[in-house]
Image (cartoon, helix red, strand yellow):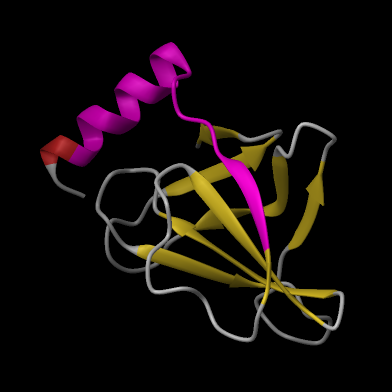
Amino acid sequence: MNILSSFWIWLCSRFGSYRVLTMVIEADMMPDVIPEKNLILLKDDGDDWSVGFKCPCGCGDILELMLLAGVKPRWDIEIDRKKRPTLTPSVWRTSGCKSHFWVTKGKIIWV
């Protein structure tokens, strides 16, 4: 993780300024462009199967997490009435910036 990413994480955790909202798309592929601070929920025939979003550390990487039962690793998603997503378990990148965070009610909580 570079110094700019570390500073961004510290700033967001200190002031709680990084939040994401959910956009739902009926598709079988992640769009080429993902809007900043948006989590894309992909559905196929009404079933949730994947989420994608830009890494909140600022590195610019696109993260895609699987929601399908039987796939490992996999995540669960809940979306409240304000379109704020909660993902479980936490997101822990093992490559790239190596960020580790929770998405809870749309807020990024750094570990």
Query: Residue at image x 70%, y 37%?
Result: 84
The quadrant where residue 60 appears: bottom left
Magenta-drawn stretch contains 14:
yes
Q: Residue furthest front?
A: 26
Q: Is residue 62 above or below residue 16?
A: below
Residue 93 left/right relative to 72: left
The residue nearer to you, when weighing 97 against 15, is 15
Q: Residue furthest top?
A: 15
Q: Which residues are magenta?
A: 5-24
The quadrant where residue 94 appears: bottom left
Query: Residue at image x 45%, y 29%?
Result: 18
Coordinates of residue 25 in the picture (x, y in percent): 67, 67
Coordinates of residue 109 in the picture (x, y in percent): 55, 32
Query: Residue at image x 39%, y 46%?
Result: 36
Query: Residue at image x 44%, y 20%?
Result: 17
Magenta-drawn stretch contains 54:
no
